[in-house]
Amino acid sequence: QLQLVESGGGLVQPGGSLRLSCTASGSSLDYFYIGWFRQAPGKEREGVSCISSRGGIIMYSDSVKGRFTISRDNAKNTVYLQMNSLKPEDTAVYYCAAYAMFEYGSTCWVDFNYWGQGTPVTVSS
């Protein structure tokens, strides 16, 4: 059974950076698509970025494009979300999610069915 654990969240000033990690146990991530989502207080969950199992498909929401970078290190069974130029509106709990699928098609927004517990990110001065 795949388990996901997010880490790297915290308090950062506007304009700062954080790197989130999503580490898997119980199964190799080699054949999983991974997505990063966030949910701010009082708001719906939002897809932030995703990456296909081989890394050939990467997508970002318009709100983070150019500031966030997703990457994966299958040898470490970990997917990263590098967040730069952080804004107060990036404040949220960030979750990673996984879906087992061979790389196919043109989108990595799939029906994720494994979820981590989330890590909070607060951007404030």
Image (cartoon, rainbow, N blue to C red):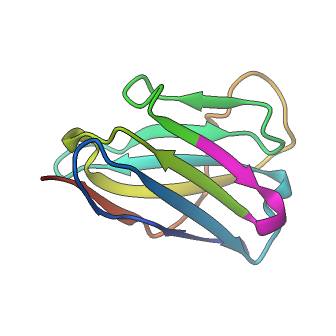
Q: Position of residue 38 (x, y in %)?
A: 38, 49
How many discs appear? 0
**Residue 76 is a magenta residue:** yes
Identify the residue at horizontal 76%, vertical 66% (top origin).
Answer: 77
Q: Position of residue 11 (x, y in %)?
A: 26, 63
Q: Position of residue 52 (x, y in %)?
A: 74, 39
The quadrant of the image that shows the N terminus is: bottom right
Q: Which of these two is toward me, 124 or 23?
A: 124
- In the displayed structure, 15 sits above or below 125; it is above
**Residue 9 is a magenta residue:** no
Q: Position of residue 42 (x, y in %)?
A: 16, 48
Report whether 48 appears left or right of 80.
left
Identify the residue at horizontal 61%, vertical 39% (top origin).
Answer: 50
Report whether 32 appears left or right of 102.
left
Report whether 73 appears left or right of 69.
right
Q: Quadrant of residue 121?
A: bottom left
Q: Which of these two is toward me, 104 or 53?
A: 53
- In the displayed structure, 26 sits above or below 47; it is below
Q: Which residues lie in the magenta part?
A: 70-77
Report whether 1 appears left or right of 18.
right
Identify the residue at horizontal 78%, vertical 39% (top origin).
Answer: 55
Identify the residue at horizontal 48%, vertical 69% (top origin).
Answer: 7
- In the displayed structure, 82 sits above or below 2; it is above
Give the residue furthest to the left: 125
